Image (cartoon, rainbow, N blue to C red):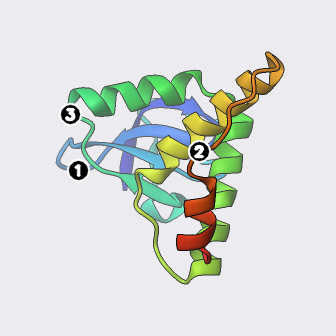
Amino acid sequence: MFKIKKVLNSSVVLAEDQNQQEMVLFGRGIGYGQKPGQMIEEKKADQVFMSVDNMRAKEFLQLLDSMPQEFIDLTQQIVQYAEKRLSSTLNSGVYFTLMDHLNFAVERHKKNINITNRVYWEIKNYYTEE
C-alpha cells in the first residue's frame, strides 16, 4: 500500500511507501478522484518509479506536472505495445524520455518546424525490430 502525497494528474501520483520513501506511480486512472493522504494499492499502478530524492527526479516530477494528459496516456500505450511486441521490458527511463519527445515533436509541428533525423538510416538498418 502507498499513501498519496500529490496527484499529478489522473494517470500519475506521487506517493510514499511504509518506509516513507517517495515514488511516482503510473496507471490509467490511478489519480482520478484521489486526494493526498488516501491509500492506494500497488497493483493499481502499471509502473512504479522508486526514490524521488535526487534533483533529476524532481525535474521529472515538474515535467509530469506540466505534461498534457494525452502524452502521458499515449506514452503508456506505446511502451506497453513495444514491450509486448518485443517480448521485453524496456528501461523505465523511456517513459520520461518518450513523453518529453512526443510533446516537443507536437510543439515543433504546431510551429511548422521540421527537423531531419540524421541517424534514420542507422536506426532502420541496425535496429530493425525496434
Residue contact between numbered discs 2 and 3, judged by CB atoms under 8 Å: no
Instruction: Give percent across and percent down for residue 101.
Output: 59, 37
- At horizontal 49% and vertical 38% (from top left) the residue drawn is 13
Q: What's the residue type where badge 3 is placed?
A: Asp
Which of the two discs, 2 and 3, labels the residue nearer the N terminus? 3
Instruction: Give percent across and percent down for residue 129.
Output: 61, 77
Which element type, helix, strand or loop, lies under badge 3?
A: loop
Up the image or down, 38 lies above or below 8; here it is below
From the viewer's perspective, is 23 left or right of 84? left
Q: Which mark is residue 53?
A: 3
Within-10-Å neighbours for mark 3: few <14, some 14–19, many 20+: few
Q: What's the residue type where badge 2 is placed?
A: Arg
Q: Is residue 35 visible?
A: no
- At horizontal 52% and vertical 30% (from top left) the residue drawn is 64
Closest to the camera, between mark 1 and mark 3, is 3
Q: What's the residue type where badge 1 is placed?
A: Gln
Of residues 94 and 52, the one drawn nearer to the viewer in this rendering: 94
Q: Which residue is mark 1?
A: 18
- At horizontal 64% and vertical 42% (from top left) the residue drawn is 72
Which element type, helix, strand or loop, lies under badge 2?
A: loop
The alpha-carbon separation of the residues under discs 2 and 3 comes to 36 Å
Up the image or down, 17 lies above or below 63; here it is below
Residue furthest top as drawn: 111
Within-10-Å neighbours for mark 2: few <14, some 14–19, many 20+: few
Q: Which mark is residue 118?
A: 2
Instruction: Give percent across and percent down for residue 53.
Output: 20, 33
Residue furthest bottom as drawn: 87
Task: Determine which quarter of the picture holds residue 130.
Answer: bottom right
